[in-house]
Amino acid sequence: MTHHEYDKSGREISSVTYDMNKQMLRRCVYLFSGVSVSTELIYEANATLMRRKDYQYEAGKLAQAISRYFNPDGTVREDQIEGFDSEERILLTYGLTASGKPLGDGKYLHEYDAEGRETRRLDLDEFDVEKLPKREERIEYSSDEHGNWITRRARSKWLGDSDWTETITVRTIEYYS
């Protein structure tokens, strides 16, 4: 269960998540700069900071978000960086160690269709982004008569593999009149 708190203008300023025994698990606090969230802080039940996410805007649109994850002793564990496109969709993601070096799990480049659905993801070598992608995923959708996707077909292949792996997700949407 999650309890949400709002300011007088209707913006969510915090939330507290509880387990089934009504024991607090975590608290999230949102700080604003004007109308936009500038910082999101997530604390464990014991008030230890788990994550700080800072949002950066350009021309009023989300351009970048940096999440800093902390160890229980308060030291930095890692940073996750997200870059956004002009439609505020994730364009590029990657991670850095506490010392600022690449985590070693790659950079991810995302592409979208006109409906804003992800259609392609490239896993790049974070040490040399000029190389061919280590992995490519292509995503296709089938939609119902309302334009909502009901089948998602994701095909992926690692560099050097000849065969594509396919994952199909099917969802059912019930509409009420």
Image (spheres, rainbow, N blue to C red):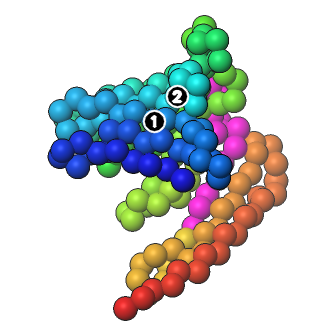
Residue position for label 1: 28
Q: What mark, if any, has residue 99 been given in the picture?
A: none
Q: Which residues are the magenta region? A: 123-140
Q: Nearer the viewer, residue 172 or 91?
A: 172
Question: Mark on residue 43?
Answer: 2
In the image, farthest residue toward the top: 99
Ranked by sequence position, the earlier of labels 2 and 1 is: 1
**Residue 127: in sight, yes or no?**
no
Name the one closer to the observer, 109 or 58: 58
Residue found 70% across the figure and 23% down from its top: 104
Q: Between residue 176 and residue 108, name the one nearer to us.
A: 176
Question: Contact, CB < 8 Å: mark 2 with mark 1?
Answer: yes
Vertical order, 177 against 104 (above or below): below
Q: Nearer the viewer, residue 35 or 134?
A: 35
Image spot of residue 157 (x, y percent)? 74, 51
Amino acid residing under circle 2: Tyr
Instruction: Name the residue: 49% across, 35% down.
Output: 27
SS category of the residue bearing label 2:
strand
